[in-house]
Image: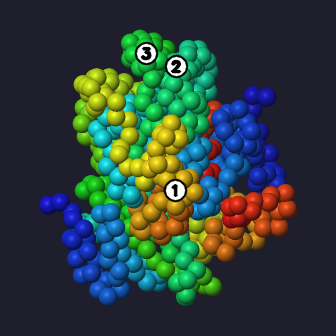
Amino acid sequence: MSQHQHINLPEGDLEKQTTTLNLGPTHPATHGVFQNIIELDGETVVSAEQTIGYIHRAFEKIAEHRPLYQITPLTDRLNYCSAPINNIGWHLTCEKLLGVKTPKRVDYLRVLIMELSRISDHLICNSIVGVDSGAFTGFLYVMQYRELIYEIYEEICGSRLTTNMGRIGGFERNFSDQAWIKIEKFIKEWPAVLKEFNDLFIRNRIFMDRTIGVGAISAERAVNYGFVGPNLRAAGVDYDVRVHTPYSSYEDFEFNIPVGSKGDSYDRFLVRDQEMWQSYEIIKQAYQKLQEFKGAEAEVYHADVPEYYLPDKKDVYTSMEALIFHFKIIMGETKMPKGEVYSAVEGANGELGFYLISDGSRAPYRLHFRRPSFIYYQAYSEMTKGGMLADAIITMSSMNLIAGEMDA
Amino acid sequence: MALTNEIIRKTLIEKFGEQVYQWEEPYGMLTFTSDAEINLKVLQFLYDDPLLQFRFMTDLTAVHYPENKGKELAVVYHMHNLVDNVRIRYKVFVDILKPDVFSASALYSAANWMERETFDFYGVNFLGHPNLKRILNVDDMEYHPLRKEYPLEDQKRTDKDDEMFGRI
């Protein structure tokens, strides 16, 4: 068969030489419930069509019938890898609407928790990139420390994954001693762990070959596609909500915003990795700042807003005011100002926005979540076109697509 | 010179005159409205103008106001100028019986799915959209569920009897 033979076939018969591959909705590589219909020419991706909505739960409709404090558990289920950021983002939105000013200590406690959740989220994303490129070790290794972060959540709010953490105005209780012991353990042990995780990946020849140049997107296209967070910064745009619109006293902290240049999977990995180091720095600073509060100040864990902050249970049984406010909040009788507010936090995936319209009734008139991964997932087709199928998988995991966040 | 709300407002009024109105600043974010027919012109101007440079579409959604006869649906755009770090909110109101708005998906790729979502939940018809079909709900759904006339729960359910708090 050394001679090349040209076979003449009637036109039209061989027009469709591509293969259609259904990736998802429950494929292990999607890491969530969504579907990709990939058109393949051999092993090259011709086009990818995404189907989402498999776990759509109508949160925006439900939110129109719930008082503010009952919406917090809904936000848990957006990006469930970093639920506390969503919770706190929602509380910040309410506080903006209600004009509640939180004490510095609450802000720092929130920063501490938000950065811990950012680490746990990035950790999962980066180790999943490892898994999808054939390196399972990192994933198993870092699980232990995500577990530690979850234990910290547990000490603070009682639950691990869907945390429902905090209240409007602060936290439901002060951090326990156990929580502080675990936070200190985390601060002490984390750098060595992340260092070792980095050593497994960053200069690993196989990993570099698998990720460099894979799923790249230019800065201009990324902005046009509404990319945010690490994915946008990997493309070279230094937009970070924490710096551009500081909330929760982020302006008091010193940290850098890592940016990439190519916008490929390797850059996304590196940006997330560097962000974990920066988050660690912020956690240390927050811990330092929190140590400086002495006496009565060190006991402050919520703003003094009895109309909106659900009182302590023991006060409800012993004090008249607490009982009244407890009843009013639970029954949704608190005064709500009219107005519309957009508030955003830097979630683990980028700008997580809450667009809230209140008409003065017990529930929001309209609540819309700006979910980062819903918006940037639409670029997936453009990013994978012309690449290999295996690269499409890595692109997917390096974008950190969370089905809960996409579907809301 | 930092881009302030006042400058944005002046620039837009200079360009569009009476066609942009209802200037507000709730919680510091400049909010304005225009007729639905010129929404793409306004967006194009916001994108192209060297001073404004609203190149980042943060959010696109709709709100249903059933009492607002003839202008029941509001399509709300949140735009962000990443250079000067300014956000604005831009609204157009349309009749629910003829909810036609021009699609911004050619200008902002991000608008593609957000418009599909808005169509899905509110039935806003984005003219010129390349692929306007449902995105989160099932394809054969016959209504647009986030409109206010649809209750949260099926009212015919009998397994739930809550005298104290009523049904919602």
Q: Position of residue A43 (x, y in %)?
A: 68, 37
Q: CA distance from mark 1 to mark 2?
A: 37 Å
- Give whichever of discs 1 and 2 has the lower sequence position: 2
Residue placed most toward the observer, A329 or B101 = A329
Labels 3 and 1 within one chain: yes
- Badge 2: how crowded within 10 Å, few (<14), some, or many (20+)? some
Residue placed most toward the observer, A87 or A196 = A87
Residue under pointer 2 = A148
Q: Residue at x 34, y 38 (%)?
A: A107
Q: Name the kind of residue labelled 3 in the image.
A: Ile
Q: Position of residue B25 (x, y in %)?
A: 31, 69
Please identify the residue farthest to the right as the structure is shown.
Answer: B158
Residue placed most toward the observer, A209 or A260 = A260
Q: Position of residue B123 (x, y in %)?
A: 63, 73
Q: Secondary structure at mark 1?
A: helix
Q: Residue at x 59, y 37 (%)?
A: A162
Residue under pointer 1 = A328
Residue under pointer 3 = A181
Of badges 3 and 1, the one in the foreground is 1
Q: Quadrant of the N terminus of chain A?
A: top right
Of badges 1 and 2, the one in the foreground is 1
Q: Chain of mark 1?
A: A
